[in-house]
Image (cartoon, rainbow, N blue to C red):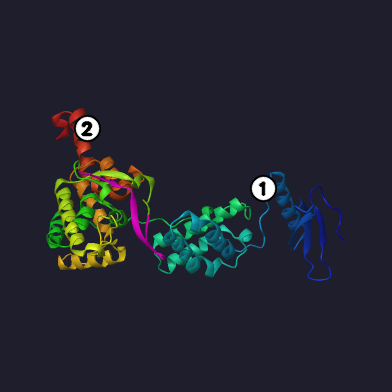
Amino acid sequence: MAGRRGNGEGSIYQRTSTDGRWCGSISMGHNEHGKLVRKVVTAKTRAEVVKKLKALQRQLDDGLPLPDMTMTVAVLLERWYEDVLRHQVAESAALGYMSVARHHIMPTLGRKKLAALTTSEIDRLLSSKIDSGLAVSTVRRIRSVLAQAIDQGIRWGVVNRNVATLSRAPRAQRVEGRTLTPEQAHRFLSELEGHRNEALYALMLSVGLRRGEALGLRWDDLNERTGVLQVRRQLKRETTGLVVADTKTARSRRAINLPRPMLKMLKAHRAKQASERLALGEAWIDSGFIFTTSFGSPLDPRNLLREFKTVCERAGLGNWHLHELRHSAASLMLAMGVPLQVVSEVLGHASIRMTADVYGHILAPDRQAAADAMSSLLWSGDQVR
């Protein structure tokens, strides 16, 4: 027997011929063909069914779409990639997102119904990844990928809340990147003397360019009269080959005043490139880039990284990564007293706060200088002593 229904409960009945579970249905209106659409929920007790139906009715009254009870986490992630992600970010970034999804999310949560996914299940996944030895940054990325996919699910109306953003991200541990000391930087530059890419590595060290930004520079980006370099694009490798793309962020598009020795080095590099072009004649590939192969074609970022490691080994510096030239540039500028705001602009950081977060430990001398200044201003000499 269905029993008397309460107000707004919809249709409720018990399946006596099978498993004895209680069922309830609620009208969701009509589809595009004019056919009545009903939503069915089940539970072990009548009270649970009533609770589910009232929750659905509240969503309908609030104008919220009802969740898709059949979509799994894996289906959402794949659909997010195909319909949205690969059109929003660079190919390498999109593939990186899906690599995280397929290796770390789908094996555990892929078959889970999206509407039934809970915050506790996500917390459990993140905890297991930390316990397995994954870096905190990787685990935070797992959470971020899942949160972004569910956020898209909300836009599509297949789920109503983002349980991933309600989960607790593991605390990020600050790891101070390595930086070349002034002595190491001099040794590095000495090893580069006469090297074909001497100007490229020196430029990355002196003004902190990202690898893609340096490789994406064209000769029309350089004003030899003023010594100002315009950073407008980046060159990177995708699965389809080398591609020219926009800079990482809007603030990455910037103008940089070059150190005078660096400008002189670039002029010498241009003269050498002109000689190579003349020697090759029609075989020369006129790509317009400042830094090229011996045939004029763009430099492959992967080849540059391998070459850089060899240069570092020969200089007796050990194993370094190209990005550490950028980190070294920022650290050395700050150590020499260049204001934080200026360093942030030279690096093309999205905000000065980002620069402070990464390099704040280098500003200790400045903080002491501020304390000393206030001591002399507010207190007498005897009190300061």
The image shows residue 72, relative to residue 57, as above or below, that is: below
The quadrant of the picture occupied by the C terminus is top left
Circles 1 and 2 in contact, beta carbons < 8 Å: no
Q: Where residue 243 appears, x then y in whole percent?
A: 37, 59
The image shows residue 58, relative to residue 124, as above or below, that is: above
Q: Is residue 352 left or right of residue 181?
A: right
Q: Where residue 159 appears, x then y in whole percent?
A: 62, 55
Give amino acid for label 2.
Met
Which quarter of the figure has residue 301? bottom left
Q: On residue 374, which mark appears?
A: 2
- Dot 2 surroundings within 10 Å: few (below 14), some, or many (20 or more)? few
Counting the numbered discs, the total is: 2
Residue that appears at 52% across and 63% down: 124
Q: On residue 3, which mark appears?
A: none
Q: Is residue 274 something that shows in the picture?
A: yes
Residue that appears at 14% across and 30% down: 381
Describe the element under mark 2 as helix, strand or loop. helix
The image shows residue 384, relative to residue 107, as above or below, that is: above
Residue tagged 1: 64
Q: Is residue 72 left or right of residue 1?
A: left
The quadrant of the picture occupied by the N terminus is bottom right
Q: Is residue 147 something that shows in the picture?
A: no
Q: Is residue 236 magenta?
A: yes
Describe the element under mark 1 as helix, strand or loop. loop
Main SS of the magenta segment?
strand
Q: Is residue 164 left or right of residue 243?
A: right
Query: For the magenta stretch, what is the residue range?
Result: 227-244
Residue that appears at 57% across and 65% down: 74
Give amino acid for label 1.
Leu
Residue that appears at 58% across and 63% down: 73
